[in-house]
Image (cartoon, rainbow, N blue to C red):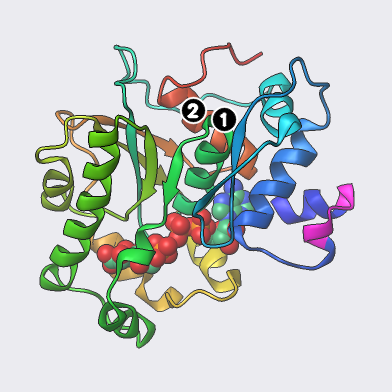
């Protein structure tokens, strides 16, 4: 649906028929945001590259335009945030493969200037080869991967830098490992109906993860429990809408939804 909307708007991404997270994000944000004039300018932001590593740069209008846009959408957020965000703030964007983690995380990084890491990049070659073959990972496959992501988070916490990282973090024990000794970590669970995820995985170009692994991902998923720090959002609507919803759920965007 996002692409149909982009086609109407004549987006370059849609014209090329590209459905990569970057393109949906960039085009979706800009198309949506261009409908409302910017209120501010010259805000320093970071631009994410293809594999998601943050690169310094000034994109004065992206953040300003986003900030200036008022969305009209139902509020589907589980509002559990009662205290100000921690500082530094480390958000792990979790959820099954194809749920939209990377798209949301890159948006958070671009808008807030936080460093972004793609959890997939921490997998061993053996893990990637296994998933590519259509075999689900086991706990044993995942422990070293989770430790690597945890190490990356520790460097951010120790430097006092806020950051956002994707990691499916499907089970409670995985999340407990990620949080242990890392007091600034909290989770953003991105959820979507399985048929929506299936469709997006089938049309996502250039990714090793086969849609056939979605059922095992869903079977392994243990949603956030009440005593875990985090919020859940629904990945419905455009990438820009989901990003806006996520920022609100995390308490990172204070201005009201009109
Ligand atoms: N809100 C959205 N609308 C349309 N397509 C989306 C949306 N969010 C993500 N996508 C697309 O769905 C696919 C999966 O999203 P991605 O962010 O890669 O998920 P994950 O990181 O959880 O595997 C990608 O092709 C992405 O461009
Ligand atoms: O624990 C796992 O089984 C994997 O980490 C898996 O959850 C992850 O989702 C894949 O690496 C695919 O990557 P995407 O989540 O980016 O599709």
Ligand 2: give its quadrant.
bottom left
Q: Quadrant of the C terminus?
A: top right
Q: Is residue 254 left or right of residue 220?
A: right
- Tell me if residue 37 can be seen: yes
Tell which of 130 and 225 is nearer to you: 130
x and y, in percent, of residue 51 in the image = 52, 62
Res 247 label? 2
Residue named by callout 1: 244
- Tell me if residue 97 can be seen: no
- In the orientation shown, which residue stands out farthest toward the bottom? 133
Q: Quadrant of residue 132?
A: bottom left
Q: Is mark 2 within 8 Å of ligand 1?
A: no
Q: Is residue 188 left or right of residue 105?
A: left
Tags 1 and 2 touching, CB below 8 Å = yes
Q: Quadrant of residue 211?
A: bottom left
Residue at position x 29%, y 21% in the image: 86
Q: Secondary structure at mark 1?
A: helix
Give above or below for 138 relative to 106. below
Residue at position x 28%, y 31% in the image: 230
Check residue 77 for magenta coloring: no
x and y, in percent, of residue 119 in the image = 35, 58
Label 2: few (<14), some (14–19) or many (≥20) C-alpha neighbours in 10 Å: many
Q: Secondary structure at mark 2?
A: helix
Check residue 10 for magenta coloring: yes
Magenta region = 8-14
Q: Is residue 155 left or right of residue 91?
A: left
Give above or below for 14 relative to 212. above
x and y, in percent, of residue 144 in the image = 15, 66
Alpha carbon separation for disc pair 1 and 2: 5 Å
Label 1: few (<14), some (14–19) or many (≥20) C-alpha neighbours in 10 Å: many
Query: Number of numbered discs present?
Result: 2
Residue at position x 35%, y 32% in the image: 161
């Amino acid at each position: 649906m996002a692409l149909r909307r982009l086609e109407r708007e004549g987006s370059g991404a849609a014209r090329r028929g590209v459905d990569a997270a970057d393109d949906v994000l960039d085009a979706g944000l800009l198309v949506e945001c261009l409908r409302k004039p910017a209120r501010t300018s010259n805000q320093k932001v970071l631009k994410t590259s293809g594999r998601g590593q943050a690169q310094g740069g000034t994109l004065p209008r992206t953040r300003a335009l986003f900030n200036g846009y008022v969305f009209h959408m139902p509020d589907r957020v589980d509002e559990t945030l009662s205290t100000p965000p921690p500082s530094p703030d480390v958000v792990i964007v979790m959820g099954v493969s194809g749920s939209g983690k990377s798209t949301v995380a890159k948006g958070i990084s671009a808008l807030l200037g936080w460093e972004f890491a793609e959890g997939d990049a921490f997998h061993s070659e053996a893990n990637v080869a296994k998933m590519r073959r259509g075999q689900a990972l086991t706990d044993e496959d995942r422990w070293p991967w989770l430790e690597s992501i945890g190490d990356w988070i520790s460097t951010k916490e120790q430097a006092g830098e806020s950051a956002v990282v994707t990691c499916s973090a499907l089970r409670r024990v995985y999340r407990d490992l990620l949080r242990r000794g890392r007091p600034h970590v909290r989770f953003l669970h991105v959820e979507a109906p399985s048929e929506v995820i299936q469709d997006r995985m089938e049309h996502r170009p250039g990714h090793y993860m086969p849609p056939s692994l979605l059922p095992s991902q869903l079977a392994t998923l243990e949603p956030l429990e009440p005593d875990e720090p985090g919020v859940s959002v629904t990945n419905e609507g455009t990438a820009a809408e989901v990003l806006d919803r996520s920022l609100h759920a995390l308490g990172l965007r204070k201005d009201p939804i009109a």
